[in-house]
Image (cartoon, grey):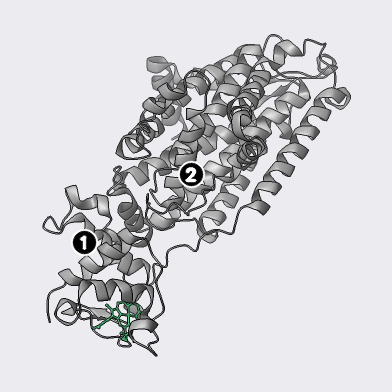
Amino acid sequence: MKRRLAEIGDWVEHRTGLIGALQHFLYEDIPASSGWHQVFGSLALFLFMVQAFTGILLAFNYAPTPGEAYDSLRYILTELTGGSLIRGLHHWGASMIIVVVVLHMVQVFLYGAYKKPRETTWMIGVVLFLVTLAYGLTGYLLPWDNRAYWGTTVTTQIAAMSPGVGAYLTQLLGAANGVGVVTFARFYAVHVLILPPATILLVALHVYLVRKHGVAAEPGDELKPKKRFFPMQVFKDTVAIFLAFALLFAMAVAVHVPLEQVADPTDTSYIPRPEWYFLCLFQVLKLFNGPLEVVGAVVLPGLTVLALILAPFLDRSQVVKVTRRFAAIGIVLLAVIGWSALTMAAVMSTPPQEAAVDFSYPTDWMQLTPDRLATSALPNIPAFVLHGAAVYGANHCSACHSVNGAGGKVGPVLNGLAKRQARSWVEDHFSNPQKLSPGTIMPPYPMSQQDRDNLTSYLFSLPDQ
Ligand code: HEC
């Protein structure tokens, strides 16, 4: 048996060179000082693979158009086996990868591992960090709920502030007339068609350069015996990956992933909130008003990125032990304090999250988003009626009323309403039932004129029963 295996191994090696390549890859020498602090690079790569895998699974069931995205996601969450788990992994994986990439950068920064000859490795790393953020930014829009819609509206407004290129960027984001189909298509294309191949290319370059220059050594390492990448570092990497995945899995199962009401461009009272890792930027933005806004929106973040990219050229000092890199430690501490303070301030000043949509009652109405019409399974129903049905569902009218035989028994059946009441009566009744029906338990429903119109149209479109 053993001999047969060896023979197969020989065959593969002779025909492809695969085994030799693997050995060459694994039995690399690494410096004596390498250890647990260097697991983050491999961990980030692993998490990228988790994102790619869960992203592909989501794409199998996700319909990437504004009319369908929300419904298909709801389908994934409520009906697809394991769908909610996959979305949880993808959502929390995105957060985790940002944490891990930042830890990786902090480690390299603290140790001064970006110094000659590893400047390019570092700069490509910074680009990879930006790519990671770009995934977050573009992915944020894809659920097409209110949170996604309004968050992205802010993003496009920030892009519009860029000096000189603002108008052009707005065009590029397809947001000249607000966030809509074009923006959605662009974000989706960037998220799935541009970023993944770019990541693969950059990671390949990054890893190639890491291999070319070897793992950065600390002063004094020359005197100690070298370690082998396999099995020592591989073992540490594997343990880190195992722990991280266990944590991610637990989060995907146990921590609620937000999904709010379907995007409602008319809901201008909605307060946009970015993802947690953009909260600090959000807060910086608030510190600058009027003509200075561009400083918070573009200048400061731009300078930060520039400083990061140029770090190897700004710090050209000799490599010393990490414990003696006081300036680097100070910068990291300052960054952590600044980031925490800004993020805390942002959290405290944003109102609590809007209640998530309750999926426990029948949610057929959610299929009926206004923009669904073009591809609707119900081609004969006009968009405003579908929107009215959505308003009916969103306000939980069915708690008291029944429609087409389904719903509560507290209030009158709403089929045949047109025969009983005038349109104007119904519309007035929504805003103040007490006035028209003294003593009624129906609460008042303050809503936009458009919602009220469409809701009435929906009720009037119901068949008599
Ligand atoms: C707490 C229970 C309750 C809720 C929730 C409720 N209603 Fe009512 N509704 C009633 C009751 C009771 C009446 C009958 C008395 C009256 O006219 O107010 C009524 C009456 C009506 C009427 C007049 C019906 C008729 O035949 O004259 C309409 C139309 C109506 N509701 C629509 C709605 C819509 C739309 C919603 C959701 C936005 C809603 N109601 C939410 C209890 C409720």
The answer to whether residue 50 shows anywhere in this view is: no
The answer to whether 182 is drawn above or below residue 63 in the figure is: above
- Which residue is depicted at the point 33% across and 86% down? 437
Quarter of the rendered image showing ligand 1? bottom left
Q: Position of residue 22 (x, y in %)?
A: 52, 22
Question: Identity of the amino acid at label 1?
Answer: Val
Residue behind mark 1: 385
Residue at the bottom extreme, as displayed: 439
Question: In this orientation, which residue lies closer to the viewer: 270 or 56?
Answer: 270
The answer to whether 403 is drawn above or below residue 58 in the figure is: below
Q: Position of residue 235 (x, y in %)?
A: 65, 36
Find residue 66 and name its label. none
Occupied quadrant, residue 384: bottom left
Q: Circle 2: is it few (<14), some (14-19), or many (20+) Cα within 10 Å? A: many
Q: Is residue 455 left or right of residue 246?
A: left
Q: Position of residue 171 (x, y in %)?
A: 37, 26
Question: In this orientation, which residue lies closer to the viewer: 311 or 152?
Answer: 152
Q: Position of residue 35 (x, y in %)?
A: 73, 31
Mark 2: secondary structure: helix
Q: Nearer the viewer, mark 1 or mark 2?
A: 1
The answer to whether 202 is drawn above or below residue 429 in the figure is: above
Verify CB contact (< 8 Å) between mark 1 and mark 2: no
Question: Identity of the amino acid at label 2?
Answer: Gly
- Which residue is depicted at the point 76% across and 18% down? 217
Number of marks in the image? Answer: 2
Q: Earlier in the sequence, mark 1 or mark 2?
A: 2
Question: In this orientation, which residue lies closer to the viewer: 103 or 412?
Answer: 412
* Quadrant holding the C terminus: bottom left
Residue behind mark 2: 151
